[in-house]
Image: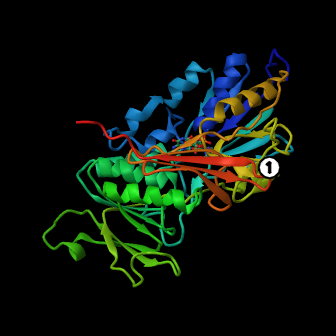
Amino acid sequence: MSAEHSSTSKGVVIVGAGLAGWHVIDAIRAKDKDIPITLITADSGDRYHKPMLTMAISQNKRASDLVRATGSDAAKAANVNLLANTQVSDIDAASQQLHLVSATRSDPANVDYATIGYDKLVLAMGAHPIFPQSLPEDLVWHVNHIERFGQLQEKLATGNQHVAIVGAGMVGTEIAEDLLKAGHEVTLIDLNDAPLSQMLPPKATARIAQAVKSQGINFLGGYQVSDVMRISDSDNDNESTSSHDKLQVDYKPIAGADSTADQQPEPLIVDHVIASTGLTVDDKLPAAAGVEFNRRTGIVVDATTLRTNASNIYAIGDCMSINGVACRYVAPLRAQAATIADDILGHEHEGYEHKPPMIRLKNKAISVMATGVPQATGNWQVKTETDDELIMDLLDDNNDVSATVTIKAPVTPKG
Ligand SMILES: Cc1cc2nc3c(=O)[nH]c(=O)nc-3n(C[C@H](O)[C@H](O)[C@H](O)COP(=O)(O)OP(=O)(O)OC[C@H]3O[C@@H](n4cnc5c(N)ncnc54)[C@H](O)[C@@H]3O)c2cc1C
């Protein structure tokens, strides 16, 4: 693309206004103030820092308090054409065109209302929460987007409630502590005996389970949720006239798991259920564009240029994977965006070099940090083990360290 950007230039089109999409805009604008950029996003395009969603409720912050700039203000400041509340429904990679529908209408009449061409396309459309069959999407919350978070926050702000969180990965474990600190009763349920069990070895996760439980979170490890259903207030509390329905959560022990009960437990009656059971990338747009894609890890990109296998299409953020590994963290986005910007603008660049970010659990009851690419299974070796500290290395086949986890008891304030 020429530096002068001819008036017929379709410019750069970015799909998705999460941290990834906005990082690409910042990186391009740092080097080129004029190249036409269109940002298409299914939401309002508001800029916010997603990691705050697992810290905000205890700080009594509403969704609007987390917005750093509205989509329209941010777009104006960056000289970007923002198409908010607009969903990309199809990509024609041969003619370099996108089909658009309204993101706010779901009726069958919501057919393509526009097409837009691109010279360069950046897919930054994130990943969306997985809802297992036992967790019906219309009854269960997630905290993967500020809009849904805002609706949950409003409900929880009405008084202390009982919340069941299904899935004790990082997001589930963090939001459990946040809700507890906000005064809610919290039950955290996981298939495994301890939180973070898909990432760390049992010796490490046992400490996390201990910390979470002693803090007052009701951790149910080794259980599977089998059903969530609405029960009306009248079934539950004849005195009440409020319209607030409760939810019944049925759950059962996993065969062979070390759960404390081996019989069918009594169902939980809760006010809300939050699913934090993982993320998946929608295959519709990658398939339409003919972009190489893996259902589990997302869009495949070249590790040094972040180009997909389709001409003039890049991918960044939660929707893409590098060397077969999804990297759903904030820290690498800046360098990834800078590489995409250089590549799009035709600047010489050294290529992106992926370094796995430091992973830090935001809980205060225990400090958990990991470097490298931690995974539950493998040759984990203890380096330090005291009451207050556990350090373990994951060794690869050559006995090189591929990950390290450091777990520390929190420093309790004196006095
Ligand atoms: C609760 C929580 C806490 C986290 N904490 C941390 C942390 O402490 N540290 C850390 O490093 N990472 C953390 N993460 C991960 C990190 O926030 C994400 O990796 C990052 O925000 C992903 O950004 P993204 O732009 O790729 O995706 P998203 O934020 O999901 O944005 C995707 C965008 O694409 C739009 N979109 C999707 N499909 C379409 C379509 N078809 N057409 C148009 N627009 C579309 C959406 O509307 C949205 O604007 C956390 C994640 C969560 C959920």
Foreground of the two, 278 or 290: 278
Q: Is residue 195 left or right of residue 218?
A: right
Looking at the rendered structure, the kind of residue marked 1 is Ala
Q: In terms of image quarters, where does ligand 1 lie? A: top right
Quarter of the image with the N terminus in it: top right
Q: Is residue 65 left or right of residue 113?
A: left
Q: What is the number of callouts on the image? A: 1
Can you give x and y, in whole percent of width and height, for residue 132 in the image?
54, 68
Foreground of the two, 63 or 197: 197
Can you give x and y, in whole percent of width and height, for residue 291 in the image?
81, 50
Q: Quadrant of residue 186?
A: bottom left
Q: Quadrant of residue 381?
A: bottom right
Residue lying farthest to the bottom in this orientation: 263
- Residue at figure coordinates x 66%, y 48% from the top left: 403
Q: Is residue 411 left or right of residue 208?
A: left
Q: Mark 1: is the Cβ under 8 angstroms from ligand 1?
A: no
Quarter of the image with the C terminus in it: top left
Residue 118, visible in the rendered structure: no
Q: Residues within 10 Å of mark 1 (few under 14, many from 20)?
A: many
In the structure shown, which secondary structural element does the residue marked by tag 1 occupy? helix
Model colouring? rainbow
- Residue at figure coordinates x 44%, y 43% from the top left: 53
- Residue at figure coordinates x 40%, y 39% from the top left: 63
In this rendering, the answer to whether 110 lies above or below 51 is: below
Can you give x and y, in whole percent of width and height, for residue 174 in the image?
44, 49
Q: Which residue is mark 1?
A: 289
In this rendering, the answer to whether 237 lies above or below 61 is: below
- Residue at figure coordinates x 37%, y 40% from the top left: 411
Can you give x and y, in whole percent of width and height, for residue 3 in the image?
82, 16
Residue 381, visible in the rendered structure: yes
Q: Is residue 229 left or right of residue 77?
A: left
Foreground of the two, 52 or 10: 52
